[in-house]
Amino acid sequence: MALTTLSFMSSFLRSNQTISVILPDLPLGTDAREFYSSGKRYRVLWLLHGTFGDHTDWVRRTNIETYATETQTVVVMPSALNSNYSNWPDFSLGYDANRYLVDELLPLVHGWFPVSAAREDNAIAGLSMGGRGTMKFVANNPELFGRAAVFSAAPRELDALDEHEVRASTDPFVQRLAGMADNVGGWQAFIDGDENVWRIFDERRDELPPILFSTGGADELIRADLARYREHAAATGLPMRFEEIPGLGHEWRFWDEAIRRAMPFLSGQTDD
């Protein structure tokens, strides 16, 4: 595959942005003029990083190029700081990470790269924070993605959280929840809004694409939450499947193995 980086001005993040894109490479023995002018539109995977990461993570720390080659999939990897893929209107000049992907990056890639815009040809996946972003994008825009994979993340029943405990916490990841609530006008607006994927998945179950949830067997950060949601999904008939990879935790060894296993599913080559 070919790897390219594109830098451009984002109107939603109010700054220059860079994305990494894996593209099909010219096969040996193939006529270049014929290959590059074929007009073929490829499947595309939107692949999201986790907290503390950026658009280079998946390329530097996994074999995603190999898996993209095997499935002939274009892979788009954006950066989103530690935003949780949410809109942060009060940060600096504004940093609307959710709108950036849906209203800017998808049109840019669909218009400038040789990829299909059809729902069935677009998949989305991410690890940890990127898994939460994946859930939000699919829950609120099910018409855009035909398949999804969530690595090391699970829906949270926001209605069961205590606002006072969240705001009193010194854990920065919990504090981020309080900031997300403030972004949308307060705690109740947060519960009722587009961040509450537990509720939205239930409400839109008939519109959702198939979603794979994958976690490491030694990932104590997420196993309990995922087990609880697995029971809920089974009881309510949601279009989701779950897998656990033994011996691995919240780490890149797991995420490399998880994306390797998920690529045939995400590229439409298998339903498993």
Image (cartoon, grey):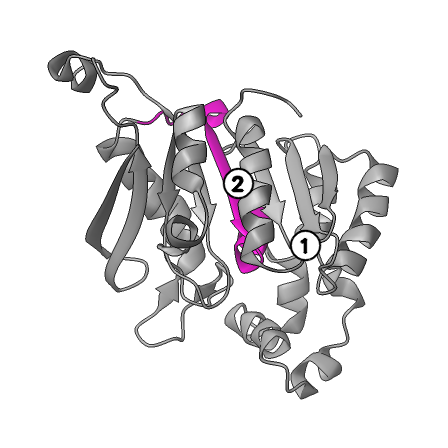
Q: Position of residue 208 (x, y in %)?
A: 64, 34
Look at the image and give the residue range highlighted in magenta. Answer: 115-138
197 or 45, nearer to the observer: 45
The disc labelled 1 sits on which kind of residue?
Leu
Describe the element under mark 1 as helix, strand or loop.
loop
Discs 1, 2 touching: Cβ within 8 Å: no
The quadrant in which residue 98 appears is bottom left
Residue 101 higher or lower than 110, as above or below: below
Q: Residue at coordinates 44% horizontally, 26% vertically from top-left? A: 70
Residue 126 higher or lower than 17, as above or below: above
Residue 171, visible in the rendered structure: yes
Describe the element under mark 2 as helix, strand or loop.
loop
Q: Position of residue 151 (x, y in %)?
A: 61, 49
For the residue carrying disc 2, how many other residues have a C-alpha within 10 Å: few (<14), some (14-19), or many (20+)? few
| Residue that carries the numbered disc 1 in the rendered image | 248
**Structural distance between the alpha carbons of marks 1 and 2:** 31 Å
The disc labelled 2 sits on which kind of residue?
Asn
107 or 82, nearer to the observer: 82
For the residue carrying disc 1, how many other residues have a C-alpha within 10 Å: few (<14), some (14-19), or many (20+)? some
Q: Residue at coordinates 30% horizontally, 50% vertically from top-left? A: 19
Point out the image quarter for the C terminus: top right
Q: Position of residue 45 (x, y in %)?
A: 44, 36
| Residue that carries the numbered disc 2 in the rendered image | 141
Left or right, residue 38 beside residue 147: left
